[in-house]
Image (cartoon, rainbow, N blue to C red):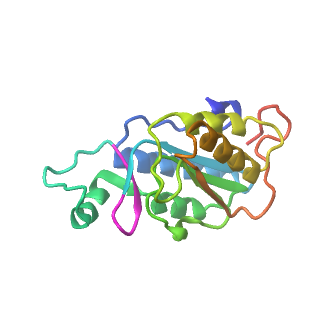
Amino acid sequence: KTLLELNFQVELERDSSIEGVRHALSRIMQKAEAAGPDSVVFFYFSGHAAEDGAKNYMLLNERAPNSFNPSDYGSRRAVLPVIGIPYSEVTASLATLKTKASFVVIDSHYDLDEPQLFEPGQVFATQGRPLLMAADSNNYSLALSSALLTPGLTVDGIFKRVQVRVAEVTNGRQIPFSSNTIGKDFILNETGDPADV
């Protein structure tokens, strides 16, 4: 709803498979390419996530093999690519676009610190910092929605406000993470009217 209010064209995938998310990402990229260098891309994932010791994965609506043992890293490395998509697949794909800015927001865990996710011209954000378990709540999405609709906030201002708000309402149990490599004071909603993006 927030992205629609900001005039984004939304590709909505609910309970999606790996194939469904990859198709949606492809459609997003085609639209961004058609819109040209002034376009803004905002990828938002809400769901479960896990890491395999090398990469963080969004877990999708795929069936895990009966042999899957989440506490064993060998099992994780074998199974996570079958039931999810690495965060890096999304960040690397969007990095190939010529856009004004790209956002990759993961409303889930960021269990493994993965600096290679921080592509130039992107904001990468998650609902929790590495090694700090994110809560199963809507605190992050509510804080993010409010900050995105606040006129005049820079990208850093948006995600700082989210960080402070979520830390407050969870008494410090959850502290959101963000990395901004856009390289300028980009404002998503300049006037309070829906942004032309």
Q: Quadrant of residue 70?
A: bottom left
Which residue is depicted at the point 82% across and 31% down? Answer: 193
Magenta region includes residue 59: yes
Return the residue found at the far left: 67
Q: Is residue 195 left or right of residue 97?
A: right
Please provide percent x and percent y for residue 110. Answer: 47, 56
Asked whether 117 or 5 is in front, the reply is: 117
Return the residue found at the far right: 191
Q: Quadrant of residue 141?
A: top right
| Residue 143 drawn above or below residue 70 | above
Q: Is residue 25 left or right of residue 192?
A: left
Which residue is depicted at the point 42% across and 42% down? Answer: 47
Asked whether 82 or 29 is in front, the reply is: 82
Where does the magenta region start and end? 51-60
Please provide percent x and percent y for residue 24. Answer: 47, 45
Magenta region includes residue 5: no
Q: Is residue 196 visible?
A: yes
Asked whether 95 or 46 is in front, the reply is: 46
Please provide percent x and percent y for residue 155. Answer: 73, 51
Q: Quadrant of the C terminus?
A: top right
Which residue is depicted at the point 61% across and 44% down? Answer: 167
